[in-house]
């Protein structure tokens, strides 16, 4: 089939992936209200475009934490990518590098951080869960730093793993031959065998630390030279606390609708977070981004850049590295067109006055 939009890749991925794998990637928590709202919220926002602006030349480039990127689109952290394609995270990091952007590698990756970093041609950041055994966490951070990753992304919205009913019904487990490489190499047990519940839920509960608090950001900063971002903030007061803890960036995220069902759509809370931090740190956002116009809306509301998740996996499932790269290039072209039609030749021209919210 001809792939015209990101939605085409999702449709095709549903046909090539196993039911268990597709549902794991696609699902949200409980009734999937927040999962759907992440997308619907963008559709409530209009763009009041400018006219009679010279847009014959357009520049999509930006910097995030001082790193030059070809466009304001980063690849979000996503677990177990070899469920989508044999090359897994290796293919994704190559696609991100070819697109001139950052890949954020999940703690729960099926390729090790060393393997991914060795295959990278662009920046790699590492998404971190904090484990009950802090010595294991410290050792993992040291590995990440030694591998050449350039930032840590601390996920803060998972004191417990939420219930993803599709995973429970499918008895989610990793097929034989796949493992959470970063954990296995750190001496932690691998994902358990198939059970009558989602194996992932039990695994997560056994390993991760539900006592995590803001004081632990200071501890994390004390054991690494890497900049630390926090991912999972949806409130202004939490954003202020994060800044006070010395983070380098905030990612407005509700975990792709996979944690608290009935959490707000991220685009709906982005501006309050941006306003609260008062430009002291950079703010990024994920959740529901499927069109170039979505990125314009996010930047107009104050995001430095956006994170793209599931569509990259759909591309990976359909055709490995090349299709993952094609997904990023489709979104690049859509963003370029949206900027031209909004009268914004550069990202700096995208201002709040473009935004009109439907009543």
Image (spheres, rainbow, N blue to C red):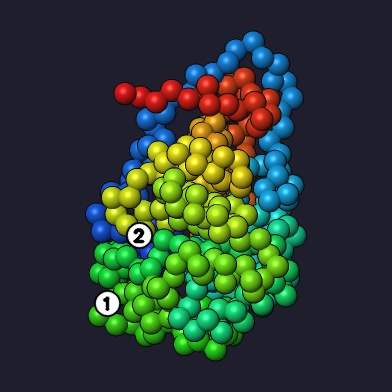
Marks 1 and 2 sit apart, C-alpha to C-alpha, by 17 Å
Give above or below for 318 relative to 292.
below
Which residue corresponds to mark 2? Answer: 259
Q: Position of residue 91 (x, y in %)?
A: 63, 63
Q: Are marks 1 and 2 in contact (CB under 8 Å)?
A: no
Q: Position of residue 165 (x, y in %)?
A: 26, 64
Q: Which mark is residue 58?
A: none
Q: Position of residue 59 (x, y in %)?
A: 72, 32
- Quadrant in the picture for the C terminus: top left
Q: Position of residue 17 (x, y in %)?
A: 42, 63
> Could one spot residue 99 in this view of the protein?
no
Q: Nearest the camera: 211 or 131? A: 211
Of labels 1 and 2, the one closer to you: 2
Image-quadrant location for residue 124: bottom right
At x 66%, y 77%, the residue is: 142
Which residue corresponds to mark 1? Answer: 197
Image-quadrant location for residue 19: bottom left
At x 39%, y 32%, the residue is: 43
Q: Secondary structure at mark 1?
A: loop
Give above or below for 292 relative to 328.
above
Q: How many labels sit on residues? A: 2
């Amino acid at each position: 089939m001809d792939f015209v939009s990101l939605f085409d890749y999702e449709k095709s991925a549903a046909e090539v992936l196993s039911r268990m794998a597709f549902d794991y990637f696609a699902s949200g928590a409980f009734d999937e209200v927040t999962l759907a709202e992440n997308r619907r919220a963008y559709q409530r926002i209009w763009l009041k475009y400018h006219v009679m602006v010279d847009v014959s030349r357009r520049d999509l480039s930006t910097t995030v934490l001082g790193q030059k990127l070809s466009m304001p689109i980063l690849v979000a952290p996503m677990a177990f990518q070899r469920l989508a394609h044999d090359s897994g995270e290796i293919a994704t990091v190559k696609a991100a590098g070819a697109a001139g952007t950052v890949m954020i590698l999940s703690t729960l990756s099926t390729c090790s951080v060393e393997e991914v970093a060795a295959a990278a041609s662009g920046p790699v950041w590492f998404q971190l869960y904090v484990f009950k055994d802090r010595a294991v966490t410290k050792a993992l951070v040291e590995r990440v730093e030694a591998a050449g990753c350039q930032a840590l992304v601390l996920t803060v919205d998972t004191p417990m793993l939420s219930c993803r009913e599709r995973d429970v019904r499918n008895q989610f487990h990793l097929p034989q031959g796949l493992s959470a490489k970063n954990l296995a190499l750190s001496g932690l047990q691998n994902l358990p065998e198939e059970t009558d519940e989602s194996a992932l839920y039990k695994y997560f509960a056994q390993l991760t630390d539900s006592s995590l608090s803001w004081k632990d950001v200071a501890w994390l900063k004390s054991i690494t030279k890497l900049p630390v971002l926090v991912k999972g903030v949806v409130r202004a007061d939490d954003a202020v606390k994060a800044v006070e803890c010395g983070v380098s960036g905030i990612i407005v995220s509700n975990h792709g609708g996979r944690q608290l069902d009935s959490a707000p759509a991220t685009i709906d809370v982005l501006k309050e977070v941006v306003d609260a931090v008062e430009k002291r740190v950079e703010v990024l956002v994920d959740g529901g981004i499927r069109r170039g116009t979505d990125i314009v809306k996010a930047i107009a509301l104050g995001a430095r850049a956006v994170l793209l998740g599931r569509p990259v996996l759909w591309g990976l499932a359909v055709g490995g590295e090349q299709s993952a790269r094609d997904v990023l290039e489709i979104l690049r072209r859509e963003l370029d067109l949206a900027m031209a039609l909004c009268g914004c030749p550069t990202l700096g021209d995208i201002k709040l006055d473009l935004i009109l919210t439907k009543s």
